[in-house]
Amino acid sequence: MARHAREPKRPSRGGALPPDDGSRGAASPGFGRSLPPRSGRWLALSATVAAALAALAGWSYLAALRARKRVEDAEQREATLRHELLAGRDLAERRLEEARRERSEALAAAAQARADAEETLAARDLAARELEGASRGKREALAALGPQSYVDRILQAQLCWKENNVPLMCEHLDACPAGLRGWEWGRLHYLAHQDARTFAGQSRVLWGVAYSRDGKLIATAGANPDLVTIWDAATGEKLRTIPKHDKIVRCVDFSPDGRRLASGSSDRTVRIWDVETGRELQRLEGHRSFLMCVAFSPDGKKLVSGAANDKAAIVWDAETGRRIATLAEHEHWPTGVAFSPNGGRLATADDYRIRIWDTGTWGLLLTLRENEAMRLTSIDFSPDGKLIASGDGKRHVKVWDALTGRQLVSVVRGHEKSVSSVAFGPDGERVASGSSDRTIRLWDARTGKAVVTIRGKASVHDIAYGRGGATTSPLSAGAARSASGPWEVTVG
């Protein structure tokens, strides 16, 4: 019992015992006795400080995280800038290398240009020496022959030209020594040979002209309703006039055997004639406007025609007159049609495009597109079928690859007005073009270089090649306010 007796209260340091009146409150759990009020305040303050320190520590941790993120971003930007700097340095080095290479090429080109200039100067000096030698030879020939004899020959040739005696004119010109021939001789020689024959007695305006395949006949289409005329190509004799169309005849074409002739007119019909008798064999109706072009197939069994405002070309059975197909993919007037030499393809032209069709299915195979609005006026296949020539209203003559549609040649300087017609020569090496500038020009089909220019007195509407010999082929033209005839054009 004494063990559990309450121990006496110990005095405080001041010597007095605290009152035992229960004012210290009840004891807290876990403690043997209650805390004094002053100790409680210190405990609350400590808790507040601890919370503040914890918050400060959290804030410091977040600040450290943000700082670390900024450091990482800065390091990433530094790496990016370093990479861009290296890439820029590499690009600058490549550009510097390209500039050095271009400079080297420019120096080489300048050296080549200097060498070419030196060669040109050497060639000029050589030409000057040759000219001096030729002049000396001409003076010696004049001294030996006498100047009056050469002058007399030139005057006689000029008189023969005025009297339309071309054979005697050629004799006088041939008698002139080669060493004496000057520009006056060249001019008269050009006049004597530029036109082999003029067919008189035609309409003042010829819209179409065609050769028969054997080169023996020429057909012309005139502005007068009664002028579809067939001529002897060798003599110029008028063989037959076909007066059956009601309006202007604009286009003609012979069948391959030369026995039939197709003509297209402003009366909106295509008619097929017997060449021997002039009898009408077929009248093909179906176009809504005046005809622009007609062409027989190489086997003579089909005929294709195009008319203004139709936006379509029509394929006909040339034997029965039955319509076989209507090629309605055109956006504008069909202005030209041409069969390939083997008959497997058909080319049609409207204002801006050339279309190539399969003649077995009449499906569209290829479209040759112009880079700008050119208003195509005429097309023609080369004799081997590999090329297509075209003429347009902006004075251009172009040559295309008929298999790929790639443009090979473009002549932009030559004719002064629109090109109305184009035709390949028999060897395929030349392209002839007729224009409203009153000229017919021949071009190299591979390079576009001008070969011959023939000047007339009227606008040329249509041209056609006949069959010639090894070095010459006759070329006929239909013109306005002028007669038509074949020129003997050298192609070799």
Image (cartoon, grey):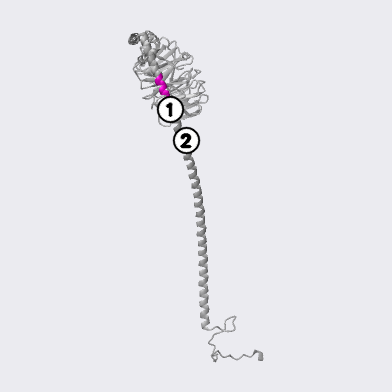
Specify the quadrant of the image occupied by residue 435.
top left
Whether residue 257 is in magenta: the answer is: no
Mark 2, secondary structure of its residue? helix
Q: Where is mark 2, residue-wise?
A: 105
Q: Quick one: label 2, few (<14), some, or many (20+) residues within 10 Å?
A: few
Q: Which of marks 2 and 1 is in front?
A: 1
Q: Is residue 161 left or right of residue 114?
A: left
Between marks 2 and 1, how big is the CA–CA gap?
20 Å
Q: Magenta region: which residues?
A: 122-129
Where in the figure is residue 56, as x and y percent of width and height? 50, 69
| Residue 111 visible in the displayed image | yes
Q: Which mark is residue 231?
A: none
The answer to which image quadrant residue 33 occupies is bottom right
Q: In this orientation, does residue 272 appear? A: no
- Residue 269: image location, x then y, percent: 41, 20
Image mark count: 2
Left or right: residue 76 compared with residue 433: right
The image shows residue 217 at horizontal and vertical percentages of: 44, 12
The amino acid type of the residue labelled 2 equals: Glu
Secondary structure mainly formed by the magenta segment: helix
Is residue 109 depicted above or below 299 in this figure?
below
Amino acid carrying label 1: it is: Glu
The quarter of the picture where the N terminus appears is bottom right
Viewer-closest of 158 and 205: 158
Instruction: Tell me the residue at 52%/58% (across/down).
Output: 72
Front residue of this view, candidates 97 and 327: 97
Residue 118 is labelled as: 1
Residue closest to the eye, 85 or 386: 85
- Which of pointers 2 and 1 lies earlier in the amino acid sequence? 2
Name the one closer to the observer, 75 or 459.
75
Image spot of residue 384 (x, y percent): 51, 21
Helix, strand, or loop for circle 1?
helix
